[in-house]
Image (cartoon, rainbow, N blue to C red):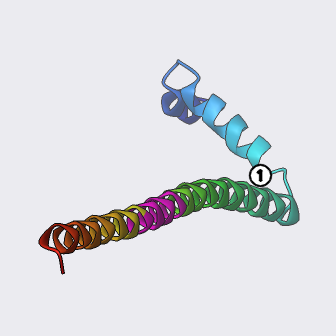
Amino acid sequence: MQQVLRAMTGGSGVLAVLCVFLLLGGCRTPQERRADVVGTIDALTESASGAFSAARIGVRGAVDAGTVVVGTVKDTTTDIADRADKIRRGTELIREGLGGN
């Protein structure tokens, strides 16, 4: 029996270390292992949610900035059109005044 065990360990004790690791790992109850898995999944979910939340905030900020830019461009366009109309109307009034009508 000892010869078989020595042949399996190969003299380096690798198999013995592996067996000790497996035995120590097997000492935990299924509930403890399940709790660790649930905890790990919760941690991953929270970090993923944080990443999605940060991305959502970034996208929402970009959309809000775009909305402000569009509003500003519309206001500027309306203002320019109004000024051009006033200039056109003023030019017509000057022509009428010079023409004597």
Which image quadrant for residue 66? bottom left
Provide the residue designation for mark 1.
26
Residue 9 locus on image (x, y percent): 54, 28
* Dominant secondary-structure state across the stretch colored magenta: helix
Which residues are drawn in magenta? 63-75
Which image quadrant for residue 42? bottom right
Residue 44 in view, yes or no: yes
Residue 20 or 68: which is nearer the viewer? 68
**1 relative to 51, above or below:** above
Residue 3 or 28: which is nearer the viewer? 28
Residue 26 locus on image (x, y percent): 77, 52
Quadrant (top left, top right, bottom left, bottom right) of the C terminus: bottom left
Residue 6 locus on image (x, y percent): 56, 27
Residue lying at 28% horizontally and 67% vertically, measured from the top left: 90
Residue lying at 66% horizontally and 39% vertically, measured from the top left: 19
At label 1, counting other C-alpha atoms closer than 10 Å, the crowd grade (few under 14, some 14-19, many 20 or more) is few
Assign a secondary structure to mark 1. Answer: loop
